[in-house]
Amino acid sequence: MKIVRTAGAIREEVRAERARGSSVGLVPTMGGLHEGHLSLVRRAREENDVVVVSIFVNPLQFGPGEDLDAYPRDEERDVLLLDGAGAGIVFVPPVEEVHPEDRATTVTVGGLSEVLEGAHRPGHFDGVCTVVAKLFNLVGPERAYFGQKDAQQAAVLKRMIEDLGFPLDLVVCPIVREPDGLALSSRNAYLSASERGQAKVLFRALQAGRPLAEAGDYVAAEKEMLRVLRTEEGVAPDYAAAVDADTFGPPLPGGRVLLAVAARVGPARLIDNIDPDMEETS
Amino acid sequence: MKIVRTAGAIREEVRAERARGSSVGLVPTMGGLHEGHLSLVRRAREENDVVVVSIFVNPLQFGPGEDLDAYPRDEERDVLLLDGAGAGIVFVPPVEEVHPEDRATTVTVGGLSEVLEGAHRPGHFDGVCTVVAKLFNLVGPERAYFGQKDAQQAAVLKRMIEDLGFPLDLVVCPIVREPDGLALSSRNAYLSASERGQAKVLFRALQAGRPLAEAGDYVAAEKEMLRVLRTEEGVAPDYAAAVDADTFGPPLPGGRVLLAVAARVGPARLIDNIDPDMEETS
């Protein structure tokens, strides 16, 4: 497994792979790797000759007061995990290699980026789209892998790929959960033992909303999810929503419905969702 | 020369060229072709195995009340000219092939896009960046060719390419002028014979400003250009500016200085510029 740190070096490594006729899968990450990330790498390994994993804590997608500085960084550990999962090239650039000091370009997806996570984290999806567009251009993969855990991010990126014509397929992989239902997240590392117990309420809330959503009563589903979130002291809900899985607007007749929740648990802001059409692994 | 109209077809044609080992140059145009465009095609032909020319009147870069509907469209004539100039593939998509109905993505270059042309045409450069990013992704050229006539556009796109890491070189080609100095423009077609005579004042103004700018007196250069523009009845200046050729901010010590003017002449809004470091052809 190779580790490269510059835009020139990643382009060169991918060019060499292309010259050998290899197909390339990209897994963009911010490090702090867990089994969810590794499931993306394994899937990418099945579907491509070589897997590029980027580790880049992208400052553009953190708002003022968010956890940019606290975000878990352990390159040595991440690299070991990626080697085990079958990554071929790890791209770990410093910030200035991705974002020039006089950077002025922003990629924005309107509408979709302004609700739920977008409403609570202004500018977040602009930062995501801008860095992902750059990673796509630097690596030029056939396929890019993202987790269903960040369902809105996946929907925003799908829209960007279609609108700007990036020549690649977006592959969204199922949420990986702990046996007790907690969705894996790098931010779970912020939780104390008791907060870890409280955090299970996110998945319980989604499960409680599911039958109501399946019966078509989205208002009742949202109320029930919120009610369940509020049963846990120390959990402060940001939202509990039933939305169309593509547009993140109101559920559409015949469309896929996504249930999504976000809440603060101690020092962590956690999100989770259920897309009844996606199977999950644990 | 092949003519293709869909995203799928242009990708397929370029893929076939790549399989033959061809390098690809892209010349994005809005049609209404003149010798300026053809000079781009010839330059692209010298530097690449195959030249793709797009003809697409991009609605995103026209503001309300601008000349989207009036913009000259004559595909048959354009195609003949391109064949003569050595184009290999002409991409003439309908609007919906480039911009999906539910399109939501915008590429914005801050700062640079907000002055001069950007100030007079709000949203114009967002529209340019968004469509050019898409053309880059659909065609995937090694080199893309733009005219110095649209100097600010070239500077904005250079910034976008650097910030988002598009894997290609931007080549900016000199302005082509009529013998009397008028810069070639598709919009010159809007001019009556007498307006055509008045339009020469744009180049005269730039020439009058040049020695003052070369002497380092940018304020005097701007005043002089404006004074000259106003000598011609029926010409309504939008701006006359001396700016840094990369940032379009105030001229910087040691930087390249660009003189730029814009004015309404009858029904046409015309722009012109001189970059003392660029040679011109006529």
Image: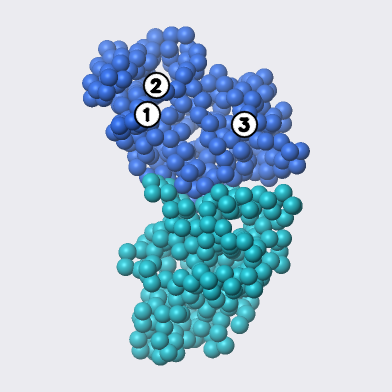
Chain colours: A cyan, B blue
Position above or below: B28 against B19: above
Residue indicated by mark 1: B256
Q: Earlier in the sequence, mark 3 or mark 1?
A: 3
Mark 2, Cα crowd under 10 Å, few <14 / some 14-19 / many 20+, is: some
Position above or below: B14 against B281: below
Q: Which is closer to the viewer, label 3 or label 1?
A: 1
Pick the residue in front: B154 or A89.
A89
Residue A195, by quadrant, is bottom left
Residue indicated by mark 3: B53
Tell me, yes or no, whether dots 2 and 1 are on the same chain: yes
Element type at mark 3: strand
Q: Earlier in the sequence, mark 2 or mark 3?
A: 3
Position above or below: B26 against A26: above
In 3D space, how far apart are the residues under numbered discs 2 and 1 (Cα atoms)? 8 Å
Q: Residue furthest right?
A: B20
Pick the residue in front: B232 or B142.
B142
Residue B97 at x, y percent in the picture: 61, 43
Element type at mark 2: loop
Residue occupying image coordinates x 57% and y 69%: A79
Which chain does the residue under circle 3 lie in?
B
Residue indicated by mark 2: B276
Residue B138 at x, y percent in the picture: 62, 43
Q: Which is closer to the viewer, label 2 or label 3?
A: 2
Residue occupying image coordinates x 36% and y 37%: B247
Q: Are the residues tagged 3 and 1 within 8 Å (C-beta)?
A: no
Q: Are the residues tagged 2 and 1 within 8 Å (C-beta)?
A: yes
| Circle 1: residue type | Arg
Q: Is residue A203 left or right of residue B119?
A: right
Residue B208 at x, y percent in the picture: 31, 14
